[in-house]
Every structure is written in structure tokens, then in C-alpha cells.
Image (spheres, grey):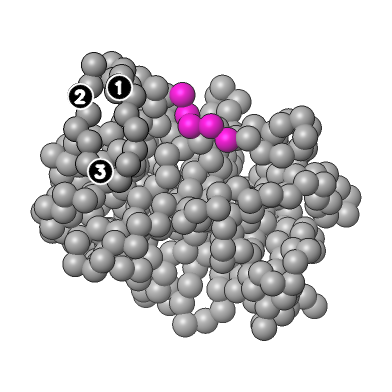
């Protein structure tokens, strides 16, 4: 990973890029991003001063981060967007941070991609996903949160480097009322996928305001522009009544099976099975826990090698006042075993960080301090 000194330089460079892009953004949008970038830069010295801050795992230059968002491989770059509070090291003021990497190891910080559109009633830019749209250009989909019902919004790049983003003028692309006779609560976190000629979007939530019916909803695009969507029903209901809700659903094909990743306010789970595009329903055959630790809020991307890359938020529970909080778990490669269960391995790109081997002599453990000499 980059050193802390490199993180400082990259953040300052990204801020300059954001300011230089002002002619391509509305004054309100550009002002909000500039203000956010300045807040991050001001917090860097505090974050750098903490010797306990990890340097091996990806994290923003400073302040809070949580869910990975909009992960996509585009023109040789792995793009990672993420939930980000530029103003504090605790949750709040959700923006989308942005970084890119050629090799999953060394990362370049980019300008903050999305800030809340306060004038349009938006308080937070919640989690979401990315997909290639018309002209094979990436499009970002996310849940817009304000003092109203949740809405699903769309943003598109203003440049081919994906440094500057513009929200769709006719947002929202999905409203609660489009569920017609289905009531969905805690509705958020769009993820997109394709099957044949059709493009779909899934969201998390539950069908009961008191919980017990955690579910995933599915929608189909009405055209190639991906700006109009139809609710096709419930893709999946959790077989267990205990999960109160489902967040960050990811639904994708892996080998000959379909895989659903969910974050049910607990350890990330997976289901593998069959997708029926006529019924718009998923029939699980296997089930397991993806990560039993503190990791949460999965997202996935596919690169040109055909690899399925798993992204996870790594929760550190860092005390307030440190200038930072949380990291991203190291990217993992997902495969499906012959038994229908997921396998995950660290991305092999990390192997080049290894240096010479160190061999330690055998020692018996008897609760006494031992001085070990490396050979």
C-alpha cells in the first residue's frame, strides 16, 4: 500500500483535480465536493499521527468510511467507491469517496465522486452499485436519503477518467410508489446485473415494519438507457425469521449457478442456486456464512480475466478523535466449489509484497517471554 506520506500527497492532488473540474459541475455540486475535500485534507495530520492506523488495507486519506460502493473494472482500472463522511471520524453526511488501482494493491485517491444535493432535499448519498450503460460508460446507482421516503438515484461520468460525476437531471429513477401493492421497508442499496439481453436491479429491505420478512426486491430496466424501471416482485425471502432486514444484496452468476450475498445486520451470508428469469425468483440450493468476523456490506466486480472480486467493509471501531475510522478488507477472489459452496482467496497480486522468508527455531511455550532469533 501507499505510505502515509503518499496518502497525503494523493489527497492534495485529488483536491486540486476536483477544483480544476469546476467548469464541468454545477456551482452547488462543485462547492459541496470542494468543501468535503478540504475537510478531509484538514484531518490528514491527525489521522497520520495515530501509529495504530493500518497501512496495509485500503482506507481514505482521513475520516470515516464504510460500505464499498459501485465497484467496477473500467479501462484497466479497478474503481472503488465507498461510503465516506468527510467531516468526521464517525458515521454521518454520507458521500461517495473514490479511488482506483491497476493492481488491487497500490491505490490512487480521486476526488470525492458524489455529495448530497442539499437543495434537492438529499441529506445522504447511501450505498449502491455500478454497471456499464449506453456507450459502455459506467453508471452509478444509489439510494438517496432525505426527509422523505428513500429514492433510487442515478449519476453518470462527465469524463472518461471517471473523475467528475453528474447526477441524472430526472432523478429519481425509482420511487416507493412503483412497488404498487407491495410495501417495502428499509428500502436501499441497489445492485445491478445482466442476464441475457435484460438488465436488472435488486435492492434490500423487508416486507414487515417489525421485521421477520427480510427480502430482496428485483426490478427490470425498460430500455437500454437504464433510466426507467419496473418492479418485478420479490426475488428472495430469507428463510429465517430472525434477520430484521437485508442490506447490500449482490446477485450475480458464478459458473453455472447464481449467487446472492446479503448483509442481514450480522455476518455476511451467501446463497447459491437457480435464477428463474420468467418468475423473477431465486431458488437457493446452498447457504453459508461468507465472513463470520466484523466485515460487512459486500460488493463485487468482474475484471477482464473473468475473476469475481469480493469487496468488504472492515470495521475497526476506532475511538473518536483519531481522524480516521475503518478500512476495506483486502480484495478476495470468489469461486464456487463443486459442492455448491463459495471459496474465497486473497487476490494473488498481493504476493509480490512478500520479501524473504524468516525461519524461527523451535521453542516450547510455557507462559514465559522468549527472545526469538530469526535465521
Report the mark closest to the observer, 3 or 2. Answer: 3
218 or 90, which lies in front? 90
Q: Would residue 60 be visible to someone looking at this image?
A: yes
Part of the protein shown in magenta: 344-348
Judging by the rendered image, the residue that carries numbered circle 3 is: 368
Check if mark 1's residue and mark 2's residue have beta carbons within 8 Å.
yes
Q: Is residue 358 above or below residue 58?
A: above
Q: Which mark is residue 361?
A: 1
Image location (x, y in percent) of residue 17: 22, 44
> Residue drawn 72% across and 65% down?
215
- Residue 332 lies left or right of residue 4; in this view the side is right
Near mark 3 (Cα within 10 A), the count class, few <14, some 14-19 or many ≥20, is: few
> Residue drawn 84% across and 51% down?
283
Q: Is residue 349 above or below residue 222?
A: above
Disc 1 from disc 2: Cα separation: 7 Å
Q: Quadrant of residue 368?
A: top left
Q: Disc 3 or 1, which lies upstream in sequence?
A: 1
> Residue drawn 60% across and 74% down?
186
Disc 3 from disc 2: Cα separation: 16 Å
Q: Quadrant of residue 212?
A: bottom right
Q: Which mark is residue 67?
A: none
- Residue 250 lies left or right of residue 178; in this view the side is left
Q: Secondary structure at mark 3?
A: loop
Q: Secondary structure at mark 2?
A: loop
Q: Disc 1 or 2, which lies upstream in sequence?
A: 1
Near mark 2 (Cα within 10 A), the count class, few <14, some 14-19 or many ≥20, is: few
Q: Secondary structure at mark 1?
A: loop
Q: Disc 3 or 2, which lies upstream in sequence?
A: 3
> Residue drawn 52% across and 81% down?
148
Judging by the rendered image, the residue that carries numbered circle 2 is: 373
Q: Is residue 331 above or below residue 281?
A: above
Amino acid at each position: 500500500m501507499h505510505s502515509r506520506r503518499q496518502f497525503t500527497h494523493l489527497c492534495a492532488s485529488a483536491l486540486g483535480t476536483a477544483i480544476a473540474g469546476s467548469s464541468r459541475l454545477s456551482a452547488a455540486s462543485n462547492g459541496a465536493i470542494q468543501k468535503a475535500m478540504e475537510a478531509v485534507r484538514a484531518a490528514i495530520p491527525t489521522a497520520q499521527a495515530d501509529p495504530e492506523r493500518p497501512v496495509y488495507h485500503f482506507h481514505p486519506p482521513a475520516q470515516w468510511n464504510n460500505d464499498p460502493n459501485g465497484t467496477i473494472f473500467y479501462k484497466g482500472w479497478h474503481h472503488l467507491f465507498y461510503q465516506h463522511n468527510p467531516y468526521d471520524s464517525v458515521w454521518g453526511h454520507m458521500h461517495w469517496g473514490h479511488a482506483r488501482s491497476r493492481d488491487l494493491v497500490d491505490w490512487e485517491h480521486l476526488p470525492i465522486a458524489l455529495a448530497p444535493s442539499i437543495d434537492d432535499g438529499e441529506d445522504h448519498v447511501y450505498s449502491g452499485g455500478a454497471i456499464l450503460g449506453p456507450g459502455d460508460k459506467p453508471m452509478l446507482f444509489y439510494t438517496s436519503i432525505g426527509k422523505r421516503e428513500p429514492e433510487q438515484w442515478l449519476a453518470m461520468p462527465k469524463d472518461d477518467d471517471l473523475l467528475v460525476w453528474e447526477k441524472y437531471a430526472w432523478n429519481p429513477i425509482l420511487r416507493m410508489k412503483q412497488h404498487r401493492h407491495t410495501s417495502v421497508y428499509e428500502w436501499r442499496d441497489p445492485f445491478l446485473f445482466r442476464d441475457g439481453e435484460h438488465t436488472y436491479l435488486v435492492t434490500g429491505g423487508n416486507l414487515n415494519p417489525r421485521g421477520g420478512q427480510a427480502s430482496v426486491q428485483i426490478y427490470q430496466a425498460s430500455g437500454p438507457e437504464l433510466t426507467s424501471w419496473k418492479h418485478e416482485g420479490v426475488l428472495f425471502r430469507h428463510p429465517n425469521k430472525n434477520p430484521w432486514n437485508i442490506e447490500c444484496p449482490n446477485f450475480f452468476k458464478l459458473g453455472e449457478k447464481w449467487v446472492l450475498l446479503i448483509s442481514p445486520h450480522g455476518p455476511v451470508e451467501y446463497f447459491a442456486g437457480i435464477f428463474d428469469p420468467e418468475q423473477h425468483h431465486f431458488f437457493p440450493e446452498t447457504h453459508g456464512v461468507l465472513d463470520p468476523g466484523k466485515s460487512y456490506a459486500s460488493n463485487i466486480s468482474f475484471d477482464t480475466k473473468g475473476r469475481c472480486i469480493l469487496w468488504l467493509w472492515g470495521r475497526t471501531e476506532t475511538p473518536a478523535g483519531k481522524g480516521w475510522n475503518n478500512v476495506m478488507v483486502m480484495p478476495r477472489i470468489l469461486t464456487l466449489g463443486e459442492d455448491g459452496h463459495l471459496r474465497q482467496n486473497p487476490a494473488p497480486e498481493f504476493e509480490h509484497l512478500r520479501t524473504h522468508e524468516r525461519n524461527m527455531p523451535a521453542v516450547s511455550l510455557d507462559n514465559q517471554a522468549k527472545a526469538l532469533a530469526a535465521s
